[in-house]
Amino acid sequence: MNVALSPPKLFVRTVPLRDHTAGLVSRLPDETPLAWLTGDEGIVGWGEAARLDLGSEPEGTAPTDTTRFSEAARRLNGLREHAEIADEVGAAGTGLVAFGTFAFAPTSPGSALIVPRVLVGRRGGRSWLTTVSDEPGALPGGLPHTASAPRPVGPVTWTRGSLTGDAWMAAVADTVTRIRAGELEKAVLARDAFAEADSPIDVRTLLERLRLRFPSCFTFSVNGMVGATPELLLRREGDRLTSLVLAGTRPRGEDPDGDRRLADQLLASAKDVDEHRMAVDSLRTALAPLAEEMEVPRSPSLLQLANVQHLATRAHARLSPGVSALDAVAALHPTAAVGGTPTDTAMRLIAGAEGMDRGGYAGPVGWLDGAGNSEWGIALRCAHVDGARARLFAGGGIVAQSEPASELAETESKFRVMREALTDGS
Ligand SMILES: C=C(O[C@@H]1C=C(C(=O)O)C=C[C@H]1O)C(=O)O
């Protein structure tokens, strides 16, 4: 674990912004942009007023260990206690805001919270600017207008991931055998793929493509993790919590009739409905000790995206007094939508079967403000971007009736999100 030095004193100021016309992504400089966007709304940030790198736990730590979340909460509280905040807007995402990404497994590196130097937000017809500085009076009053235009990605070379398609299908087959033998009920298996461009990838280009193609998803960029996830681990507004659970997938059809047929098949599939139920059950069980009221629909509805369609359940809860967003993140991660059932057995199987470290893939990614408002997605349909290289991830839930070839095809549909974002002119 990192030993926290005494936190810096931060001077935070949020002011309303009158200029509503410019898109949020166009505000961003190209270096390490931070973003959380739904369509035209959300928050973007740049610079680092504070960076909390959270250490990884030693090998052998229980797969459900939550130290990285409690460490994040403790260190963020330290920052908040020292901060001087002048907030003229007072909405979700104003004041002292940190973007965050957490590794899927406690033993993986890469979990971090970042407080940007500058943040621009827009929501419900209001826009704001937050600046964070180390000295009183050194607060910039307006926006720096230095952002350059986003660059195209250029030609990309694709290489296969940690496992070949055949090796990955063999891992799926082995998992099915273990499920049928009664060792567990469900495990989500993922794979990776690599892309290499000729020059550093401009993350803003990816963000703009992703938010336009997936306006109902959460387009994010935090500490190298970039993607557009449809899955909301949780949103906290006051004491209200919302979560959108997804599990059960079909591709989109070629035409409206084919599309409807695939949707009907999905809604009627005992295999997918069961797989979905496990994800919802894992949420319900994790949330129950934290909530005073919970509202979870009995049966899933359909969520259609540009590349795939999912079974979806939107759950609501009222959190018990004193339960923070990070408490809820720690309790909910990993849901059976990205881990499995039972959680511990599935996590151990995943660590052995995938032949790779997931890093931040399938971990929580999002932001929180000083008032306790917060949004955390599950980092899916994403890549880790590092200079000219991108490592893409995609997975799917494996249950007793799963077939390796269709699971492989499902991961290909999910890879499309980032493959297309990385392809100019697609
Ligand atoms: C694991 C992923 O997606 C998850 C798995 C799903 C499934 O198995 O049907 C559906 C949505 C997500 O919860 C991914 O996109 O990589």
Image: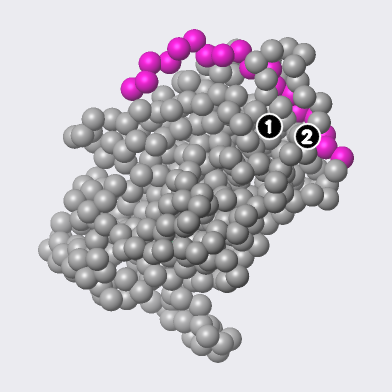
Contact check, label 1 and label 2, Cβ < 8 Å: yes
Residue 275 colored in magenta in the image: no
- Along the viewing direction, whichever of 129 and 246 lies nearer the viewer: 129
Question: In this view, which residue lies farthest toward the right?
Answer: 18
Q: Is mark 1 within 8 Å of ligand 1?
A: no
Q: Residue at x 15, y 56 (%)?
A: 183
Left/right of residue 314 with respect to residue 29 in the rendered view: left
Seen in the picture, residue 138 relative to 106 is either above or below; the reply is above
Q: Which mark is residue 118?
A: 1
Image coords of residue 369 (percent x, y): 62, 31
Colour mapping: one colour
Q: Residue at x 26, y 57 (%)?
A: 162
Image coords of residue 201 (percent x, y): 52, 52
Three-letter residue code for mark 1: Val
Figure quadrant of the C terminus: bottom right
Occupied quadrant, residue 256: bottom right
State which region is magenta. Answer: 1-18
Q: Which mark is residue 143?
A: 2
**Prevailing secondary structure class for the magenta stretch in the rendered image:** loop
Q: Residue at x 42, y 38 (%)?
A: 102
Occupied quadrant, residue 46: top right
Q: Residue at x 48, y 26 (%)?
A: 52
Figure quadrant of the N terminus: top left
Q: Label 1, label 2: how many angstroms apart (C-alpha)?
A: 8 Å
Left/right of residue 104 with respect to residue 353 in the rendered view: right
